[in-house]
Amino acid sequence: MLLYVGLGSNLGQREEYIRSAVKLIGERVGHLVKCSSLYESAPVDMKTDNMFLNAAAIFDTEMEAHDILNVTQQIERELGRTQKSDARHYDRTIDIDLLQYGDNNFEEAELTLPHPMVPERRFVLEPLVEMDPDARFMAPPFPTFAQLLEDFDTAEITVPEEPLAIDWRAVNFLLKQLSPGKSITWTDYQQIFETPNNYLVFLSDYVEDVKRRVGMATLCITQSPTGKKAWVEDLVIDRPFRGRGLSHRLLACLKCKAAEMGVKKLMLTSRPVRVAANRLYQHEGFEQRETNVYAFEVRPEDIGEYKNATGGQRLKRVGKLMDD
């Protein structure tokens, strides 16, 4: 059966560790069928300055899945890995993940196949698509690796802590789509960051291989006699990126931030002629008031509701893993 393996390293001679792992797996598990190029990527879900090299490989083997796991974990130890990831992720000389093995589909404490994080990790999907784009991911609804990569969301939400000129220009570009002729001066833009409990939230995505701001919203929090409230202002998505659910992601982030700040009610205004926007707010649970103000009752369970996309960065192909 075909075994799909993911490999990564962010310590020491990264390329050599990955090559050594592929060689040892080929010797102890089964014949090497194909391997991907090497890709460089930023760390995901961990704090480190060490960039990763990633690759994937396909082997032909008849070993039992748990025996393969034991062999690959032994190879990791031989190549200098001292800590396995648990609730935290650590730098490592080598990481070997069993991604998929035949049509095996099971979940156990030690091993889950196929690997549940494959659809969420671009640094896994790109090498898989390079090797075998039409192979199916063996979990319902059984998409191909190519389909998973095509559907991968590279949009990312960030909350900047200081004003930058490049962001100021992006705000003015987006404002024109929200209110034609509207703009903000650099001085007024700086005041957004100087005002307590004001948060400008950006949504970024790739435009011709360059990541830029394609959406934004502002969260303004204030204390009133009836409790802490917050307003959503200037929510806008760049026209070519509309229809992908990005406004929902921005609102999910704002709800989460409001909950963290102890906000009891989150509100926004919308003109009646903005039919699509009004539908969005109603779908997101905002209640329309007689004053044409939408209000959302923030709950304690909203804390942590929002999770930004992970692994969404584009990868840099840096060379071959094996010679032809």
Image (cartoon, rainbow, N blue to C red):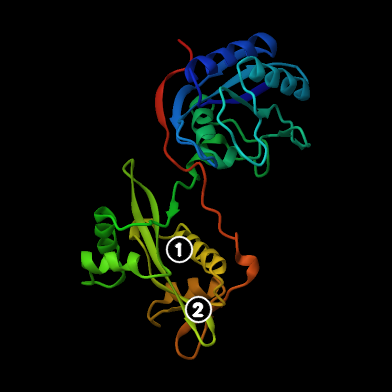
Q: Nearer the viewer, residue 171 or 162?
A: 162
Q: Quick check: 265 above or below 194?
A: below
Q: Which mark is residue 247?
A: 1
Q: What is the tally of numbered marks visible in this picture?
A: 2
Q: Is residue 245 left or right of residue 273?
A: right
Q: Quick check: 117 above or below 62?
A: below
Q: Quick check: 150 above or below 257?
A: above
Q: Is residue 288 left or right of residue 213?
A: right
Pointer 2 residue? 229
Q: CA distance from mark 2 to mark 1?
A: 21 Å
- Quadrant of the snapshot with the N terminus: top right
Crowding near the residue tagged with mark 2, few <14, some 14–19, many ≥20 C-alpha atoms within 10 Å: many
Q: Quick check: 91 above or below 26?
A: below
Crowding near the residue tagged with mark 1, few <14, some 14–19, many ≥20 C-alpha atoms within 10 Å: many
For the residue marked with disc 2, what is the amino acid?
Answer: Lys
- The secondary element bearing badge 2 is classed as strand
Across and down, in percent, residue 29 comes to 69, 14
Instruction: Give the residue at x 51% y 49%.
Output: 309
Across and down, in percent, residue 71 comes to 72, 17
Instruction: Give the residue at x 38% y 52%.
Output: 204
Q: Nearer the viewer, residue 110 or 181?
A: 110
Single out the mark in the foreground, 2 or 1.
2
